[in-house]
Image (tube, rainbow, N blue to C red):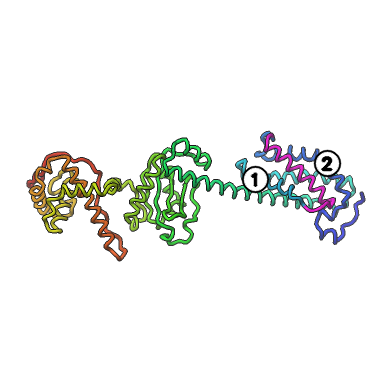
Amino acid sequence: MGGGTLSEERLLAGPWSALPRSFSAGVRKEEKTLAAEIIREIRHQVPEFSRPLDGKFGAGIQYGVETALAEFADRIEGSGARSDERLRVYRALGRGELAEGRSLDALQAAFRTGARVAWRRYARVARRSGLGPDLVVVLAEAIFTHIDEMASVSVQGYVEARADRAGTLGRSRRTLLEQLIAGAPPEALARAAADADWPLPTRVACVALGPVTDHPEPGVGRRRLPDPVLADLEGRQPWLLLPEPEALLRDGQVQRVLRGRGAVIGPTVPVDMAGDSLRWARAVRDTGAAAATGLLSCDDRLPELLLRGDASIVRLMASRRLGPLAALTPKQNVRLGETLLAWLQTDHGSAPAVAARLGIHPQTARQRLHRVQELFGDDLTDPDARFELEVALRGRSLALDRDHAAADPSGSPAPPPRRVADVRPVSGGGLTIGQGGV
């Protein structure tokens, strides 16, 4: 094989066509031993490939190297365009990297190592074949162009595999969300979590959001969330599910999604109660309480949730226990109801304590408490009656707040809701009022 000269016409056709076709025979003789040398050097130079090349992983690497060397010789020989089968091999290398849980960095390093080994071997073949310096330069260009093209196809395979996985993972996570909210049995939840590649936590909290149109920034529904967060942001009632809620609520990505959405955070509950956390969060959001505050926790409103859970029972208690207020004027009715509730919530406190809670003068509180004693009498010494009175008055307070919000067409923020402390049976004696309190 003579050295020859490099014609402009052959150079423009590409580096392979510029090489003598007969050079392919010398290249082919090296394929078997060169493949072994390349794999040995890759395992030595690239830590990710240092493990034994057995099974599917090893077979894929071996086949990929052998295919690349055979194709290189074919291109020098001019034996036709690249086959779909060979392109599939290179794409499979990229897919394999994703399957192994690695980035493309290791594969790219392996390509570079293989190119250097091939260049050293083919340079020796070129010297033995008498290729001139110009053709040796072309040979180097052909080798590294071939590697670049292989790498490009492998990247395409990696990206395709990642997209496929994202689609499959997305479907699995939607299924998992449905199972969580439906309260599926533990075995079914464990299987769905495994399919979704989602470590099943012990406790979660759900966050109810307003529709995407509530948010001033376009595209907020498509913001990326941390991987542990499960979400349905496209439905009519968007929501999130957060494992480790305290940590994730401090995450900047989560905060950006919550911002301006009237978010209500449900209570943190065992994972099998995720549906309850979402239901309670939506119940508070439906009251409109979060519109002005922007972010509200149900943990601060558990008694309210209890009272809203069965409004008919609360109304029945009110009709039974608040009858003595019915004969009063509306203003008197509200004032004495607030006074009685304040007394119950201060553990039957003194007139000054009730006055401080209501923001009125102690003497005014004392006068109202006398009137409450006249109206309710023995009910104030009966623990069950006092409990029902407190529930009825709390329920009425919530209703007044709701009516106020509904009657305000301006959209201005409603006044802070009346404080609803823990609902509990009250104890102690009746209402006794003196200069020092009760």
The overriding secondary structure of the stretch rendered in magenta is helix
- Residue 166, position in %: x, y? 56, 48
- Name the residue at 80% across, 38% down: 33
Side of 321 relative to 259 (left or right): left
What label does residue 161 carry, if any? none
> Which disc number belongs to residue 95?
1
Categorize mark 1 by other alpha carbons within 10 Å: few (<14), some (14-19), many (20+).
many
Label 1, secondary structure: give it.
Answer: helix
Q: Dot 2: few (<14), some (14–19), or many (≥20) neighbours within 10 Å?
A: some
Q: Residue furthest bottom?
A: 410
- The one of 327 and 135 positioned closer to us in this rendering: 327
Q: Position of residue 321 (x, y in %)?
A: 16, 47
Residue 123 colored in magenta in the image: no
Q: Quadrant of the C terminus?
A: top left
Verify whether residue 78 appears in magenta: yes
Secondary structure under the numbered disc 2 in the rendered image: loop
Q: Amino acid at mark 1?
A: Arg
Pick the residue in front: 157 or 293. Answer: 157
Image height check: is 337 above or below 43? below
**Gap in angstroms between the C-alphas marked 1 and 2:** 28 Å
In this figure, which residue is indicated by the disc labeled 2?
30
Residue 397 left/right relative to 295: left
**Residue 235: x %, y % from top left:** 45, 54
Q: Which residues are magenta?
A: 54-81
Quarter residue 275 falls in: top left
The answer to whether the residue labelled 1 contacts the one labelled 2, judged by CB atoms less than 8 Å apart, is no
